[in-house]
Amino acid sequence: MERILDLYCAFVKAVIALCLAVMVVLVFGNVVLRYGFNSGITVSEELSRWLLVWLTFLGAIVAVREHTHLGIDSLIRMLGPTGKRICFIINYCLMLFADWLLLSGSWRQTIINLDDRAPATGLSLGIFYFAGVVFGVSAGILLLYDLFRVVSGQASEADMVAVRETEDHT
């Protein structure tokens, strides 16, 4: 399972890089066309905005996997293994609840906006809100996997400190 999650995150990172590259081309191309040729790419602003939203949600998936989201761990590091386990379980149950709220809200917004069209591209607005669904499902799986590892005793004490500084992560 660990290998599958790592491959999925590698794929997500590739999609993030693609989103960023397309955004750069769209925005830079639009600037050059506007100032140099007095024209522009009509869909540039809208697509760039959508790609930024997707890039942000996809980046959050990678952050959940690599445990690089924001958090304060000074108290947790002082606790013993049992205290760390209890705090980890409470923390992950709360994160799963928040993830469920985001997932269900994003799903509802996707369904509501499925037939609405974006003004410049004509694409379904459901695509925009589906980024939250992709994040919600992915983060839910990652959170459940980490929670299962802790509850089943497969995680080390260091794994129960779910926040890692960038210097700690290689």
Image (spheres, rainbow, N blue to C red):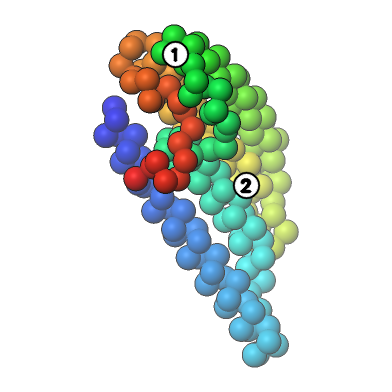
Quadrant in which the N terminus is drawn? top left
Q: Position of residue 48 (x, y in %)?
A: 61, 62
Q: Can you see residue 137?
A: no
Say if 151 sits above or below 75 in the image: above
Mark 2: amino acid = Phe
SS at mark 2 in the image: helix
**Which class describes the residues within 10 Å of circle 2: few (<14), some (14-19), or many (20+)?**
many
As drawn, which residue projects farthest toward the bottom? Answer: 36
Image quadrant of residue 91?
A: top right
105 relative to 161 in the view: left or right: right
Q: Position of residue 38 (x, y in %)?
A: 70, 88
Judging by the rendered image, the residue that carries numbered circle 2 is 128
131 relative to 147 in the view: left or right: right
Tell which circle, 1 or 2, labels the residue nearer the N-terminal end: 1
As drawn, which residue projects farthest toward the front? Answer: 78
Residue occupying the point 68% across, 87% down: 35
Residue occupying the point 57% across, 70% down: 26
Quadrant in which the C terminus is drawn? top left
Say if 93 sits above or below 73 in the image: above
Q: Position of residue 13 (x, y in %)?
A: 41, 50
Say if 7 sits above or below 29 in the image: above
Judging by the rendered image, the residue that carries numbered circle 1 is 80
Which of these two is toward me, 127 or 81? 81
Q: Can you see residue 135?
A: yes
